[in-house]
Amino acid sequence: MTDFVHPALLFILGAVAIPVLKGSIRRAYLVLVPVLAIVSVLTIEPGSYGAARFVGQDILLAKVDKLSVVFATVFSIMALIGTIYALHLKSAGQHVAAFVYVGCALGVVFAGDYLTLYLFWEGMAFASAYLVFAAQSERSTRAAFRYLMVHVTGGVLLLGGIVHHGLSAGSFLFGPIAGSMDTGAYLILVGFLLNAAVPPLNAWLTDAYPEATVTGAVFMSAFTTKTAVYVLARAFPGTELLVWLGTAMALYGVIYAVLENDCRRLLAYHIVSQVGYMVAGIGIGTELGVNGATSHAFAHILYKALLFMGAGAVIQVTGRRKLTELGGLYKTMPLTVTLYMIGALAISAFPFFSGFVTKSMVVAAAGEDHRAWVMLALTMASSGTFLHTGLKLPYFMFFGTDRKIEAHEPPGNMLVAMAMAAVLCIAIGVFPGPLYALLPYPVVFEPYTGSHITESLGVLMFTALAFVLFLRALDPENTVSLDTDWFYRRGARAFLWFAEKPLARYEKAASDVSETAVLPFLHGTARAGLRFDLNGVDAAVNGLARAILDGGGTLRRLQTGVVTHYALAMIAGVIAATAIIAVVWQ
């Protein structure tokens, strides 16, 4: 491994120095580490690194191929953008957590065995949870604990699956799970699906991301779900179940976004929807499908981060996050509006924006695989994405009713980060070739055909017309939407009720019985045992000791020291012995 510098180590070890650096030196250092990671990823050679044996099993710290490199590339770029967005933070805690988070995500991407993958996987969960705790509010603290509860549960399932599958397969090396699915493979799949936020395992995302810090949510939007997409592409390509789960995700997120009033929760539901395209592409399993899922993950990380940065800028400046409390900000935040809209057009798959050249690849893969219903559902989801992320959210957040909010543009570093993401969204859309060259399989797909552009614009324009016609019906309402987190929230309350009521009553009753019956009996038995010990055992032992002492005293008196006395004793002993023998002999 002398010729290989693991990008994960740059971030994880680099996090150690952050607290001791101050001012401009810290800011320069924070930017330098992601830049070095980008260079490391772009210059890395394909191959296997860090092979060893541990507890009798082969482990492989890093496996580098085209699939891992494309994810590592966008992760490193996103780390740079996210770090620049957060440069204004004075506290080192969030920077440290973000670096560890990014490093663990890169560790998962390059992991060549399940044990290495699991360690980095769990590291992601705890590092990202800090970004929610760091908001330091009651809501964020509760959300962070729920987030940890869900991810620790998923980690236990994943570990169980790894152990079961590894023992049955005879190897813990990470790769495609071939043949029939055993119990271990299904547990691994569930662990991956949880991090991908596949319904009904999705509510942790829409619960925690809106409660994270402004900068923390940007990082969280990029890494957890996309590492899950990577491991699904690595281990489960062509799994039929993923086609239908992904299609359901795409629609599920869009439907819930209709109901949302919180700007970041609305964007979080669209993460669920967009990841659905990736999961479906992996499930289709063809080269076009996997390429589409991979390229869409690349584009999604950038435009979704841009959208979260735009919403975060509004929250940073106004302190408000509900659409019912926002409006009229285009006058005071024109740069933020412009940059946000680039992200909105990218996620909506407008021509010449990144989503157009990636999302359409997944839809085309469904068509090539003769899945008409999947194509239709994904197209409908794309229309819904434009309706809510491209029209509803910006209209009510930046335009709409003027709330007379005193606002201004966010700090310059935040605008620079947003501009970087916006440039990449446009560059990928106009010049998709460099991205296509990174993909795991050769790309035989042309996004800019007359029919594709016409169809896409037709769907988007029809959606815009529907928005204008039904604008009143789309007015946000100050309500809370119930999702699948209702079950574990209720379940947790039921558990606490059980612990505090029936279980506590049982414990009290058992304690009362113990105090009134069991303990007196035990005390009485102990006292009887003590009396027996003192009056019986001790008396017998003491009597025997006294007898021995008395015998010893008698023997001492017989030892006079006179030789004639000893001679007489010996003669008497001989006479006595002779008499005894004579009697016995008869």
Image (cartoon, rainbow, N blue to C red):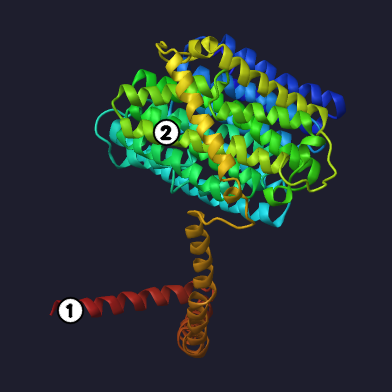
Q: Return the x and y of residue 164 as percentages of the image width and height.
A: 33, 40
x and y percentages locating residue 300 in the rendered image: 55, 28
Q: Return the residue found at the far left.
A: 586
Q: Which amino acid does label 2 sit on?
A: Leu
Element marked by disc 2: helix
Q: Earlier in the sequence, mark 2 or mark 1?
A: 2
Residue 310 position within the rendered picture, expressed as x and y whole percent measured from the top left: 70, 34
Three-letter amino acid code of the residue under disc 1: Val
Q: Mark 1 points at which residue?
A: 584
Quarter of the figure with residue 263: top right
Q: Look at 57% across and 53% down and name the residue there.
A: 146
The image quarter containing residue 420 is top right
Q: Looking at the picture, tell me which residue is in the foreground, 81 or 465.
A: 465
Q: In which quarter of the image is the C terminus?
A: bottom left
313 left or right, relative to 159: right
Q: Which mark is residue 336?
A: none
Residue 90 rendering spot, x and y as whole percentages: 82, 36
Real-space Cα distance between discs 2 and 1? 115 Å
Q: Name the residue under label 2.
A: 378
Q: Which of 458 and 136 is in front in this view?
A: 458
Asked whether the viewer can see residue 172, the reply is: no
Q: Residue at x 47, y 86 (%)?
A: 518
Q: Above or below — where is 341 with respect to 469? A: above
Q: In this view, does 527 lie to the left or right of 423?
A: left
Q: Between label 2 and label 1, give the one nearer the viewer.
A: 2
Element type where label 1 sits in the image: helix
- The answer to whether residue 574 is visible is yes
Q: In this view, does 159 lie above or below 115?
A: below
